Amino acid sequence: MNEFLGIALRISVMYLFALALLRLSGKRSIGDLTPLDFAVATIIGDMFDDVFWAEIPLSQGLVGITTILFLHTLVALADSSSHRIHRLIAGMPVQVINQGQVLEEGLARERISIEALWAGLREQGQVQEKLPEIKTASLEPSGEISMILQEAAMPVQKRDLQRLKELKK
């Protein structure tokens, strides 16, 4: 019974600690995790597990997790204040399409298949047959594909209607 009470107590302390960490760590959402955020979450998750099952003392776990979060916060501050550090930590977008042509070297550099590229484009409503309509597409550091369409393929805007009215005059 004492063993179960100890587990419940450690889990309760760690739960409250996790809530405090989430509150202090900032406003990033889970969907915006960078690879570095993922690595930190994995490390912290493993440390939580060690505390839950009393593989390490509660105090050591709290110090370890606080240290990791503190270091991660310092890296995030440096990342947000310096373009060079941001490029080093987050990486840069890699162009995968230029003027409707797939850039095989961009795909190879990021180790993604052409099928993964098509899947990313489909998620944005772009189909393979409309490839010539894409001026440029890049694989962002977040793993998402961003694209700029050729001017002729862009959706009609209010200014386009105004230009059309002026041409009719």
Image: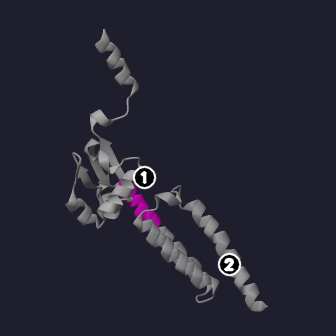
Above or below: residue 134 compared with residue 89: above
Q: Amino acid at mark 2?
A: Ile
The magenta stretch spans residue 111: no
Which residue is painted at 37% across and 21% down in the image?
161
Q: Please tell me whether mark 1 sits on a helix, a strand or a loop.
A: helix
Name the disc covering residue 123, or none.
Answer: 1
Q: Could you say where residue 40 lies in the image, as x and y percent from the top left? A: 47, 71
Magenta highlight range: 72-81
Q: Is residue 36 left or right of residue 59?
A: left
Residue 27 position within the rendered picture, expressed as x and y whole percent measured from the top left: 53, 55
Q: Which comes sooner in the sequence, label 2 or label 1? A: 2
Q: What residue is drawn where x is 37% and y is 33%?
A: 155
Front in this rendered view, residue 119 or 106: 119
Q: Which mark is residue 137?
A: none
Q: Say how the picture is coloured.
A: one colour
Q: Residue furthest right?
A: 1
Report the predominant secondary structure element of the magenta stretch: helix
Q: Is 75 a magenta residue?
A: yes
Q: Quadrant of the C terminus?
A: top left
Q: Which is more toward the observer, 98 or 131?
A: 131
Q: Which mark is residue 11?
A: 2
Q: Is residue 149 above or below residue 6?
A: above
What's the distance in space between the residues labelled 2 and 1, CA to CA?
40 Å
Horizontally, residue 140 falls left or right of residue 69, namely left
Q: Position of residue 35 (x, y in %)?
A: 41, 66
